[in-house]
Image (cartoon, helix red, strand yellow):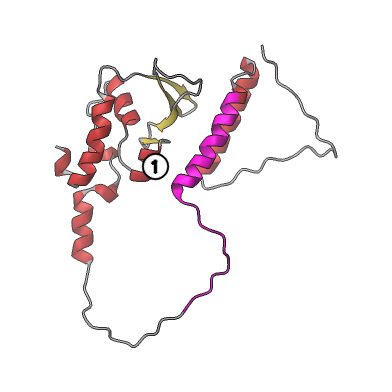
Amino acid sequence: MLLNLVSRHAAELVKQQYEFAILPTTKYQYYPVGPYIMMQYDDENKTDDILEEYMISTEAWTCSCIFRMTHLLPCRHIIYYRKETDCDRLLPKSIIHPRWLLKTYRKLKSKVTLVEDVEEAFEIRDIKTSSTTRTKSQNEKFRELQVIGKQIAEIGCQWGTTAHATLTASMVQVLEAGKANNCPLLRQPESEHPRSTSPSLT
């Protein structure tokens, strides 16, 4: 059925995610965090204490995992959650990004026009860039933010319930600001020497 909607390459990518998601041995724990769903991979053989966590939006059916962020295709976390919550279809057309739909390819192909001859003369020039700063790839930016997010989680999990709830609410606000393409600014106290407070660990 998926082959009727997307290219064979896209179908193969989704197939790998689908097959993992429906395995009887695949287990995720999930719980709501504000308007999102936090997914934690339950692996009994995991030797370290760092959990694999991903955040799903059930409104737009997006996920914070690298596969969904880079390929814009349904990932194993979305498929697993839809399976566990008894959605009518695991892979409906509505959760597939338009860039992968065959009808999008056909529409673009019909608009492509080929120019065999150059109508006007041109010359090639070197263009000096105003900045030498290297542009980071999407994966690099994702990994940097993921490291910071895990550090916040490692600290926050040691706090008391009230402090943890406050931190979670603040992170949700930061996330909402990011979704709106805004960069939240953290304001320092007006005093010359900001006072540091340690949340209760109980």
Residue 65 placement: quadrant: top left
In the rendered image, residue 91 lying in the magenta stretch gets the answer: no
Q: Going 61% across and 15% down the picture, which residue do you hit?
A: 161
Where is residue 121? Give x, y as percent. Answer: 34, 88
Whether residue 186 is visible, yes or no, is yes
Indicate left or right for 179 with 63 as reference. right
Q: Between residue 46 and residue 139, name the one nearer to us.
A: 46
Q: Going 28% across and 86% down the picture, which residue do you hit?
A: 119
Q: Is residue 195 above or below residue 71?
A: above
Q: Between residue 142 and residue 197, name the one nearer to us.
A: 142
Residue 39 placement: quadrant: top left
Kindly give the residue lying farthest to the right in the view shown: 192
Q: Quadrant of the N terminus?
A: top left
Disc 1 target residue: 69
Q: Between residue 6 and residue 12, name the one nearer to us.
A: 12
In the rendered image, residue 149 lying in the magenta stretch gets the answer: yes
Magenta region: 126-154
Q: Quadrant of the C terminus?
A: top right
Q: Going 29% across and 38% down the picture, which residue do you hit?
A: 95
Kindly give the residue lying farthest to the front in the view shown: 47
